[in-house]
Amino acid sequence: MRIPGRWREGYVLDYHTRSSDFLGYDEFGHARFETTRTEIGDLLYRLKYKREAEVLDSIVSVAARFVRKWGIHIDAIVPVPATRLRRLQPVVEMAKGLGRALDVPVFPEFVRNVKNVKELKNVFDYGERIKLLDQAYAVRDDSLRGKSVLLFDDLYRSGATMNASARVLAEQGGCSQIHALAITRTRSAS
């Protein structure tokens, strides 16, 4: 599926879920859902939330196959900066695997956080997301100036994070072309 943004072309491979039915609240007041995920959505869920590293190769294989069919020229892969620190950063690990599969260098932390941004998964208003991300990122240096870059993320919701990253890649980093790829997207755009 195409995704609009501050890039030449952008795609997401599939939705994250097929359905999610509200079941009620648990004894702690937390909403409970019965969720059915797409095949790639389930793999991403298992990697990101269950820490099942063995699914990484399957995700990378699907992404690499897509990029090869896409037929774009890229000089580098830049993962979107994470808003939540984890011991194993799924976006970075997938980007590294994709880089190996495509024989393209990966620049983790090239776009870096320069202000503390709270995790955005519970911020549903697009305007609020944009406000939180204003001046949140900077590029590390100018080593990608004039290069064609694949901006990579795991989950696309509204595009706010990817757009903020693409903006600094273009404006501060001087990248000549930016393409965007996310593994899955939410069903809602907020």
Image: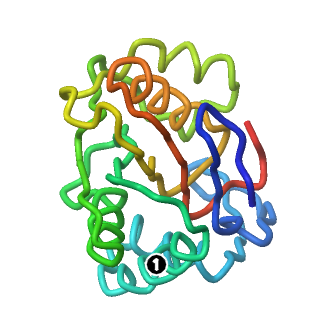
Q: Quadrant of the C terminus?
A: top right
Residue 119 in which image quadrant: top left
Side of 88 relative to 47 (left or right):
left
Taking 120 as reference, is 87 left or right?
left
Q: Name the foreground residue: 104 vs 131.
A: 104
Secondary element at tag 1: helix
Q: Viewer-proximal residue, 9 or 98?
A: 9
If the image is split into quadrants, where does the N terminus sit? bottom right
Q: Is residue 116 above or below residue 75?
A: above
Q: Is residue 43 shown above or below 153? A: below
Identify the residue at image location x=56%, y=13%: 131
- How many numbered badges does the structure rendering display? 1
Kind of residue indicated by mark 1: Ile
Badge 1: how crowded within 10 Å, few (<14), some, or many (20+)?
many
Tell me if 122 is positioned left or right of 168 in this view.
Answer: right
Residue 176 or 41: which is nearer the viewer? 176
**28 or 43: nearer the viewer:** 43
Residue tagged 1: 59
Which residue is rendered at x = 39% and y = 33% of the image?
A: 175
Q: Position of residue 101 (x, y in %)?
A: 33, 78
Relative to 115, residue 66 above or below: below
Render colour scheme: rainbow
Q: Position of residue 38 (x, y in %)?
A: 68, 77
Q: In this image, 34 relative to 170: left or right?
A: right
Q: Pinpoint residue 139: horizontal percent, then vertical percent.
A: 27, 26
For residue 141, which quarter of the picture?
Answer: top left
Q: In the rendered view, would you say 134 is above or below 174? A: above
* Residue at 72% in and 71% down: 34
Please name the residue shown 50% across and 70% down the image.
45
